Each structure stands twice: as C-alpha cells, then as structure tokens.
Amino acid sequence: MSMKTFIRVVVALIIAAVLGATYLIVSANPDATSPSGVPSGFVH
Amino acid sequence: MSTDIRTHQCGRLSLVSVTLTAMAITVNHLYTIGPAAYALGAILVVLPAALLLWFNRTAGRIAFVGYVLMSVWIVVGFGAMKGFWGTALRLFLGTFLSRLSASFPKPPIGTLGFELSGMLTFIGGLFVLYYAYKLVEAQRVVTHTRARLAISAVLIAATMVGAYVYNDRDKWVAPRNGVVKIGVIVPTTGPYAILGNSFVKAVEMAKEDLKDTKYRYELVIRDSGPDPIKAKDAIQKMIAEDKIDAIVGGISLIGQMTKPYARAARIPHLCVCTVTSIGDGAYNFTNIPSPQAEGALWVREAKRRGIERFALITQDYPSINNHVKALKTEAARAGLVVADEQTFEADITDFRPTISRAEASRPDVYYVEALNPGLDRLAQQLSDAGVHNVASVVAPSLSERPDLFEGAWYTDSNLRELAFKKRFEDKYPGTRFATHMMPYAYDSVNMIVAAFERGENPAVYLRNMQTYEGTAGTLMKEPSSGNFGSTPAVWVIKDGKPMLMH
C-alpha cells in the first residue's frame, strides 16, 4: 500500500468514526431540540 | 507537470469539495431557515463553478480571486463557524464539559439529520481549505510551506477550543444596581385564568415574604395569554427589553415556548409544568409532581378503594394526555382494567352520548379530566345522569363549581402545611388557591432568590441542586436532570371544598 493510499484510508476511518460518534451522541438524547426554536436576530 | 495542468487538476478537485460541502450546508440550513436554504445552496454551487469556468477560459485575476474568496467564505463562515464551533465543539466538547462540571450547560442536541449535516459541513470545509490551498499553490502565489499552513490551522483551532470553553462556562455576575428582576409569565386570561391569577399571587406572596436579603428582588409580571404563538412576543420582550435575570412560568404550552428563549439568554427558567421535556437540565427546569407520580398514587388509591374497572372521559390536551398515558401504564401494571376510554375536544357541549357509552361499560369509577368550561359542563351532565363515583388527577381543584364534584377523589399537589393555603386565602380573599401549582410557584421564586443570595450563577445553582425543602414537601432532582419531582397527595371534595386526605 502506497503512503498516499494509507493516508486516504486513515482519513476515511477518522471521518467514519466522527460521524459514528455523532450518531451515538444524538441517539443518547431522545428529546431533540429544534435548532430553529429561537428566531434569528433575537438579542438578549 | 506544467502549472496549467496542475491548476486544472486542483481546480477540479476544489470544485468537487465545494459542491459536496455546499450540499451539506444546504441540508443543515433546511432545519433553520427552511426552503430559503435551497437559494443559499444554489449560490454556493453555481457561483464558484461559474468563477472557475471563467478562470479556466481566461486565466483572469478577478475570476481567480473571486473563486478563492468563495472558498474562504465556505471555510470560515460555514466550515469553521457553523461546522466546527456550532456543531463539533458543541456536540463533543460541550457534552464533555457538562459531564465534568455543572458550570457548563448540557448542549442542545438536534435531530440526526441536522447534526450529521453540521459535522459534514465541518469536514467538507477542511477539504475545501486543502484544495483551495493546493490551487493557490499551483498558481505559485503563495510562498508559505505546508508545515506553516498546518501549524497556523492547528493554532486557530486551539484558539477556538479555548474560546469555546471560556464562553460556555456560566459565571456568576452580580445583579445590576443590586436589583434582581424575576420574570413571571403565565396566562391570566382565557381558560387558564384561575390558575394564572392564583400563580401570580403566589409569586407575589413569595416576594413579600422575603426578609433581609442582600439584593432587591423585582417581579416583572407578563400575561402570556392562552395562545402560545402570541406568548412569544411577551417572552421576547421580557428578556430583551426588561432584561430579566430569571423566569418563573406556568402551563406547559407556554413553558415550551419559553424554553428556547431562556436557553438563548442563558437565564434559568423554572416552569411549573407537567411536560417533562421542557426541563433540559441546563437552563430550563420543571417543578411539579410528574404525571408518573400522579398516576402511581391514583392507582394505589383506586386499589385501596377496591376499584377494578374504570372509564376514562378526558379532554384532548397535552398535559391531560400525559396524565392519562401515565395512569394507564400504572393501571396495567397493577391489573386495573380500562373499561372504556373517550376523549373530547374543548368545544363539545353535549356529553350525554359520551356518558351513556361509559355507563354501558359498567366501571367502578369514572376518571374525568378537562379544562373549563368543558370540565364543569361535563361535571354537571354527569351529576344530572346520576353519576357521582368520579375520580381525577387535579381537575376538581380547577373547577369553578367544586360542588358538582361532591364526593369525588383526586390526586393533586401535597401541602407540607395547610397553614400556607390559609395564609394565601386570608391575604388574597378574592383569589382561588389552585393547589396544583401554587406551592411550586412560591418555591420557584425562593429557589432563584437562594441562588443570588449565595452569590452563585442561578442556572449552575439549580443544576447542582438535588433536594429542596419546599412548601409542598421535599422536591428532588436527579443529577443532570431538569425535572424537580415531588410526591402528590389524595384530596377529596367535601362540602364543596377540596380536603386533603393523606
């Protein structure tokens, strides 16, 4: 395996791990918060 | 390889990364700005493609600079800010910090599609940066080495991590001019008028009971009205214009509207609400017996009375549906049979067919729950039909004709001392003491006051709190939970008045 291929495989694995971790975090929080709950431009 | 060939190769890969990232950005923005996200996506796809095509044909400087600027916009505006700061740091670092210390709030977490598209925006941004750099390098307009670029990127990322940690921590800030403003938002008109007005009096009583406090406490009372959409204006005005430091609210429909505003303003919101999802454990907390606790006690009392079958006649309404759901779960566990189940809309006036059907199922008791005017209409028609074996959760205490419920038993909030209720009624003779919410409204004000008097950020104080000795008994909260729970009690209507049984 060339160095270039090796780096591509590592990058692909990192991306898969990050997306998998995102899935796990979201699954552990069943009460999804609406990201649009507060209108943009709202200032405290 | 010649400069032209390398430029074309890098340009093609750069455009692929820009297009894929623009797709992730579009999906992510669909959740926040709706269909307008398609327009954003079209700009992010078409404009770079047109600029690159122009550059490939003319090798013009304007086209090249334009394309690089588009890439910078995607890398900084979306990849770094939306993807890295707004998604990756929030999800991973925010969650980690909140587990480490209550000084950090639990981050809000959206749907899987929203979060994955946010992460892909971040990852895509890195590819856009890489290929944009390769394109610029191919044009030989940069003299930096790759190592210097990598070090700069790592330093920027580390700075953003540090800034996120600093910004995410809730710190104690002494109130302006020594005045703490507590916003009170409940509907004092419409079907909730009895609850809302009683709620306002309870928080006023809590404020008047304060003695020798370090800070001065002001109540900013706003009528949300019964319509949650219109309530938004009142909530927004209270936070943005009145500059309140905390919120005490009631009624789940209004609490659901208040929740995102309290979080955005980073002020605590104690809601006397039964919808437990309002309590996020970060800035929003519910404070009332849970539907599960009400259901468990109701079933225990039903068993004690030898009840085996019951009929449900309830209004279709979120908090009532929550009570019914919990009640049915507990009943199934205890072996009680639901003989009949009917729900009705708020505007129904003739309950006779409903009552006849329930009677035909021969229940031992009729479980009735509704809001007025439907509640008293139903109670009147049950009485006319000779049905007096009625039970409920909370409802009879909200009736304007409690005499219609004579003999009915129900679960409702407990009271540590009946003297609290008497004191309230003596102080506000024209206002009904709605047992369901009043002790918790009173306690909620005192919890916020306690935080400020201790010199602690009130949201952090509430996150750390696990027990509170309140007027309705001991309130308890699991660590990291946003729901203060307490044990309800059984009440009965005797001589037209609620009486605490046990």
Image: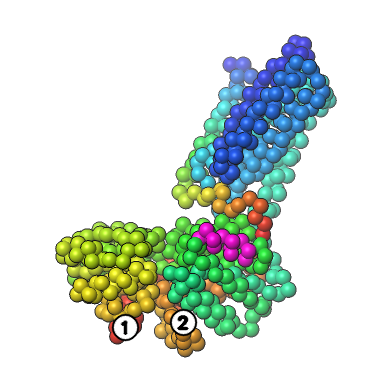
Q: Which residues are magenta?
A: B228-238
Indicate the position of residue B74 as horizontal and vertical percent values.
68, 34
C-alpha separation, residue under disc 2 versus residue under disc 1: 16 Å
Chain for mark 1?
B
Q: Helix, strand or loop at disc 1?
A: loop
**Along the horizontal axis of the image, is B263 left or right of A31?**
right
Q: How many marks?
A: 2
Q: Which residue is at 73% across, 73% downward?
A: B177
The residue singled out by tag 2 in the image is: B431
Q: Amino acid at mark 1?
A: Gly
**What secondary structure predominates along the stretch shown in magenta?**
helix
Name, please, the residue furthest toward the top: B1
User: Which numbered dot is residue B496?
Assistant: 1
Q: Position of residue B300 (x, y in %)?
A: 27, 69
Contact (Cβ within 8 Å) of mark 2 with mark 1: no
Q: Horizontal and vertical percent for residue B53?
A: 71, 19
Quadrant of the rendering where the N terminus of chain B is positioned: top right
Rendering quarter of residue B464: bottom right
Q: As shown in the figure, which amino acid type bears the numbered disc 2? A: Thr
* Nearest to the observer: residue B228 or residue A32: B228
- Location of the C terminus of chain B (image quadrant): bottom left
Dot 1 surroundings within 10 Å: few (below 14), some, or many (20 or more)? some
